[in-house]
Each structure stands twice: as C-alpha cells, then as structure tokens.
Amino acid sequence: MSGLDTAPRGDAPAAPGFGAFVARARAAGTLVVQPRMGMADPLLMRDGLLATRGAAATTVGTITLDSYTRTGDLAAARSALTEGVGLNGYPIASHPVDVTREVLRGIADAGFPVQVRHGSAMPEHIIRALLAVGLDATEGGPVSYCLPYSRTPLSEAVANWRRSCELLASLREFGAEPHLETFGGCLMGQLCPPSLLIAISVLEAMFFRQHGLRSVSLSYAQQPEPRHDEEALTVLGRLADELLPDVDRHIVLYAYMGVFPRTPGGARLLLEDAARLAVRTGAARLIVKTTAEAHRIPTVGENVTALETAAAAAAAERLRPPLASVPDTGVEAEARALIGAVLELDTDIGRALVRAFAAGYLDVPYCLHPDNAGRARSSLGPDGRLQWSNVGSMPIAGLSGGPRPPILGSADLLGALSYVQWSYDSRAAETRDLDRTPASLDRTPASLDRTPADLDRTPAAPRELGHTTP
C-alpha cells in the first residue's frame, strides 16, 4: 500500500492532485518514492501500477511513454501496436482513450496520483492525450527535453512548451491543480556540475509559472560526491523558496543517472545513499533505480523491491540527527549568477532562455545540440566532485575559487563516467568480505540473467518493462 493516510482530519476527502499528495507525505515526514515504468500492453501497464500502489512504501505511479510517441511519430506507434511490434513504453496518444481510462480505473486517485513521463521536446500532443484520459501530472522542460534528446531548434521547443504549459494550466478553470516537474536538474546529470543543473531547474520552473502552472517540482540528479549533493540540494531549495514563493513546490531527487553499478550490492548501496540524501536535504520525492539497471530492463518485482529498499533507507535516516551544515564551494554563487544573467535578457523567460544559449551564458558540457555553444567542459575531481574545466562564456569565471582542473581526454572522460559504478561495486565487495551478506539479499551478477520468483511481486508471472530515459 502507499503507506500514507491521505484523508485529512474530519474524514473530509483528500485534496486531489500530484502536488497535494506529495505535500501531505512531506508533512507526515515520509519520502515519496517513484519508479520508472512503461509498458505498451495496457494489461501489463495496469499490473505495474497496481504493484507500485501495493508496495510497502509511499508511492506515486508512473506511465513512461515510448520513443515513437516522444518524437511525435504516432503513425509508427499505431503501426507497432497493429503489428505486435514491441515498444519501449506506453503509447498514450495511440491507444483509445477508453483503453487508458480502463488501465487507470480504480488505481489512480487522490491516494495514488499517476505521472506521465515522456522525454519530448515537442509535447503538446502528449499533454492533450494525458488530459483526455483524466491525468494532470507530467514532467520535462523546454531546455531539458530539447538539448540532450533532440535536434529540435530550442526556439521551437520553447514555443511548443509554452502552449503545452498553457494547455495543462487550463485545467485550473475546472478546479484541478495540474502538476509539472522540471527535468532541468538532470540535464546530462552525470557530466554537469551542480550550478548549471540548479539554474536550469529553477529557470524551467519559473517558465512553468509564467505560463500558468501553480504546482511544480524541481529536479536534481544524484552525483558522485554526497557532500557536493548536500550543498547543491540545499541551494536548490533556497532558490526555489526565494524565486517561486507563490507556487506549490517540492524537490525531486533522481538516483544516479550515469553508469550504474554492475553488482546488485553496489546498486543497492547507491540507491540507499540516494534515499538518505533525499531525507538529509529535504527532498520530498525520489525517482528510484533497480539492481538490474546495468544489465537489462527491470521487472515489475525489481521495481517494487527498489521502492521498498529506498523507503526503508529513508525511514532509517530520519532517526539520525539532521544535517548540521553544508559546505560552500561556490555552487550558490554560480547558480545565482547564471539565473541572474538569463533573467536580465528578457522578461519573457522563454525568449531569455533562447538568447542565453545563443550568447553562451548557458552552455551544457558535451552536448552536441546545434543551439548549444559547446565550449563548456567539466572534470571529475579527485574527491569525486564535478567541477568546471572551462566555463566558456558563462558568467561564472572565478566564482568557485581555486584552480580549474584540466580538460579531460577521451580515456579520462570514460573513466569519469565509470567512477560511480566501480566505486560502489568496490564498496559492495568490501562489505561482503567484512560481513558476509545472505545470498537472499545480495545476489551475484550471474543471477541477473534470470528473474527470481521471489523478486516478482505482481499478481501474475514476471514481466519485462520498457522505459525511456526519463
């Protein structure tokens, strides 16, 4: 079950809406945990949502869309459904509306809101489809779902996201409170120093508010060094409070989005660290990953296990003393400088974002999109912190102090991308050597080639899930 009593005092019905659910969980001192999950078959999708709702954790549901729907190729999605070709997510714009409503019937409600995740630079057709089936929560952003995922011109993505926000916000006329999560804090998250992630997350949330949304969440992706993440999440919360005071808001943390540990023990340690980080820094929601991430698409049961593992780690962390202080390595100064430089360009945040990228005031390292300046570079320091090697034209030179590390060569870049994977697998191996973990809790990598029956928690047999990057 969700683990959260959603009815307020006096037995009045709980307020509907994704943001309201997370707010109640936060007030109750509970971390909301959420899987990445999307299957083309409506029955499998319904089973996945049921299993998520039934987990021993406070959960929200996810419907992740397929790549054809994400890119707007609905003819290809319909053809795949007709021909029985596998899709890597749920084609919400191609299934009949009544079919998707049946998937959600008796599951999606105020006690278990469902979010649509997609990865689209041009999401207007997706917004129309999710509204048609009665959903009102999704995620993305005009920058974060354009630069790394498409070659759509940024100006076109901004225009489409403007219409999409206004369309979603129109639900407020009917008493609903739609919710939109920015993906900005996950933008090339394994390669971006925190200040840029924070700036894009805040700017996209301000864009959402400017176009009618009053319930938003701001994302941030877990990085290699916990103290750096503590600093970044503290800064993100502070800036959100300052720049978005008039909207319902919360922080959502993503378990590490780069190369994941290959051993189940390493993957579990990384997920548990993410849950503990969320609690220490006041994040209200966590997007989990499973022990199968490095090998294959996880089963429903493995997703449920990940949800319950994260929830248990979060509950244990709440018993520890709160975070006393965080370091100041210049993350806040850089984030403020980036946000300020963009807001000075235009009162319309969408136009300001386009101009900022054209001028190089925002520059995503290692991103090949034509509208990205491509001069910024980052490096992984010896302490595990992501740092700027070259800031290009971004207005942050000298704000973090100290010498800049050298620009990485190709071999060093590959090593940096694998740093988290080998460090957590090494930790897991050391833990096994010191304290032999029962085989039922720490399976060997070979066991990932099959789906153990005790991992599957769905009403039927083990089933594979498809999902896209979001």
Image (cartoon, rainbow, N blue to C red):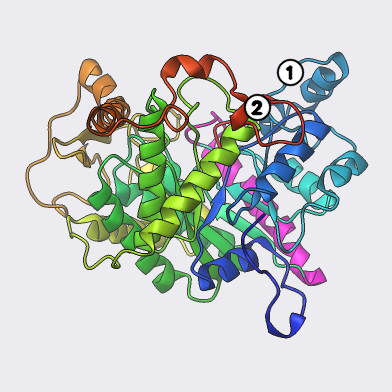
Magenta stretch in the rendered image: 147-175
**Residue 357 left/right relative to 349:** left
Secondary element type, mark 2:
loop
Q: Position of residue 158 (x, y in %)?
A: 57, 47
Residue at 59 percent of width and 23 percent of height: 452
**Residue 24 left/right relative to 354:** right
Q: Which mark is residue 67?
A: none
Q: Magenta part mainly helix, strand or loop?
A: helix
444 is within the stretch colored magenta? no
Q: Amino acid at mark 1?
A: Gly
Q: Which residue is mark 1?
A: 86
Q: Quadrant of the C terminus?
A: top right
Residue at 92 percent of width and 43 percent of height: 98
Compared to residue 359, the image places residue 77 above or below, namely above
Q: Nearer the viewer, residue 160 or 322?
A: 322
Residue at 40 percent of width and 59 percent of height: 279
Pick whichever of labels 1 and 2 is earlier in the sequence. Answer: 1
Secondary element type, mark 1:
loop
Taking the view exactly as shown, the residue that stands out farthest to the left is 403
Q: Position of residue 27 (x, y in %)?
A: 52, 73
Q: Amino acid at mark 2?
A: Gly
Instruction: Tell me whether circle 1 and circle 2 mark residues in contact (CB < 8 Å).
Output: yes
Evaluate whether residue 373 shows in this view. Answer: yes
Around disc 2, counting alpha carbons within 10 Å, would you say few (fewer than 14), some (14 to 19), or many (20 or more)? many
Around disc 1, counting alpha carbons within 10 Å, would you say few (fewer than 14), some (14 to 19), or many (20 or more)? some
